Amino acid sequence: MKTILRSVLLLFLLAFSLQSCEDQDDVAAPASLQVNDFVWKGLNQFYLWQADVPTLADDRFSNQEALNAFLRGYSKPQDLFQDLLNKPISKFPKGQAIDRFSWIVDDYTVLEQELQGTSKNNGMDFRLSYKPGSTTDLVGYVRYIIPNSDASKKEIKRGDLFTGINGTSLTVSNYQSLLATDSYTLNMATFNGTGFDGNGKTVVLVKTTLDENPVFINKVITSGGRKIGYLMYNGFYANYDAQLNAAFGELKAQGVTDLVLDLRYNGGGSIQTSTRLASMITGQFTGKVFSKEKWNAKINEYYQSEDPESVLNKFVDKMDGAAINSLNLTKVYILTTSGTASASELVINGLVPYISVVQVGETTVGKNVGSVTLYDSPTFGKTNRNPNHKYAMQPLVLKIVNASDFGEYTDGLKPTYEKLERITNLGVLGDPNEPLLSVAISQITGISAKKAGDDSGVVLKAFTDAKAMDGIKNQMYIDKAPEGLLRALK
């Protein structure tokens, strides 16, 4: 019922919007103008900060020709898109934009695949950090290797360091171009205690079309009389929800007493999946509000007057007709780093009103806003898409808060117990002695953790990571555009 009402309301809203911008004739506009028209109208309708961008105002253009005259000033849709986003404000002295996460692509097929965990990928997930004392030179380290990837067949592993690509040193100005190619050679390095020395080793990596199952590790650790479930989950990809549920089924069957959920490298994804994950951790709150969506004023007005339930995401006990394997926990331990974002943060914030959440690691990214995929079609969904191009947008369309109406964490969610990852001792993922996991286990059992590396060692300042570079893998999104839902129900 929720999806039916949401679809009807949004379609009704679209029917009454932009009346002043109707086409003045039946002559098809050039493809470039068609794309620009789609960009402006999609953002005018759905963009979260539409009311704060003067150029997106409903009365900004008196008719379609006036709008066209403006749109013709942009030869690239990407430039128009960027100019229509919410701009920096005075409280950000460095000119940081309010909107850091909206996205546009010129091929929606690639976008759709990446939102479900399929991408052109060599299988090396990494983080780039500044070299000590530098604001321009970078060093990368391997965080994990995706199974069945090209990297999984090469001599490269978690913790390996690299400072160059194809013989060129990595910097803040060239890293994107060097890492964007389909194949490249890593120039490996060794940390000498104060800096990094090239060690002569090279690794050639080749990108292929790769499916990444986000359930990376699922195991039970017995310690201090407790059965501790450990789940490393690396992306909220909805088409792997069955595998996620099966993982919880395994933990439940083994009678776990506690859970450590490792989201340290999880950039986010599906809001629906985050709700399901929270329901698997708990189970005793079915039907209660997990999170609330706050859209722009135009869409909120319809929801509030016609169906307020449409903006509520509630704990569930089933998914696609199958029972959810719930652990009924009253406390959960979650591992985070500065790469933990969006739907991962939603799980933490959404659970806080209901159970105790113990966060171990680093402060998270601070992404409390969500997006939706918009296509160039009459209702911005998949049906009747414009055949003249394949552009699609992933703009921010909603802010999300928990059941207590808290959602102000743009500076990130701070850990209960801080533990920074250090290149000198990253540890083995899933090993009880791995530094972050060791802290969580010690909190569960009450037994002091063994010395897990030298906390006085060098901490590198983070610059970016593989998921943040991709952009698409650092999103929190609604799984289906409203028109897509409506079509499925017809």
Image (spheres, rainbow, N blue to C red):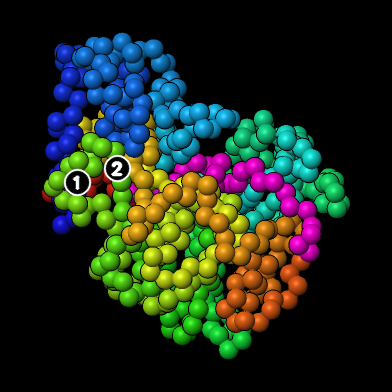
Residue nearest the viewer, comparing 368 with 353: 353
Identify the image quadrant of residue 183: top right
Range covered by the magenta-colored residues: 454-478
Q: Amino acid at mark 1?
A: Tyr
Mark 1, secondary structure of its residue: helix
Residue 469 colored in magenta in the image: yes
**Which residue, given by chain and number where applicable, does mark 1 sit on?**
303
Please give the name of the residue rendered at 57% of the width and 51% of the height, measured from the top-left corner.
339
**Is residue 380 at all visible to an observer of this figure?**
no
Marks 2 and 1, Cα distance to the nearest angstrom?
9 Å
Residue nearest the viewer, comparing 160 with 448: 448
Question: Residue 479 location, x and y as percent?
Answer: 33, 50
Q: Please tell me the numbered disc located at residue 333.
A: none
> Answer yes or no: do the residues labelled 2 and 1 have beta carbons within 8 Å?
yes
Please give the name of the residue rendered at 65% of the width and 42% of the height, measured from the top-left corner.
463
Q: Specify whether 185 is left or right of 176.
A: right
Question: Residue 414 location, x and y as percent?
Answer: 55, 56
**Which residue, given by chain and number where applicable, does mark 2 sit on?**
295
Q: Amino acid at mark 2?
A: Trp
Mark 2, secondary structure of its residue: loop
Question: Residue 45 location, x and y as percent?
Answer: 26, 32
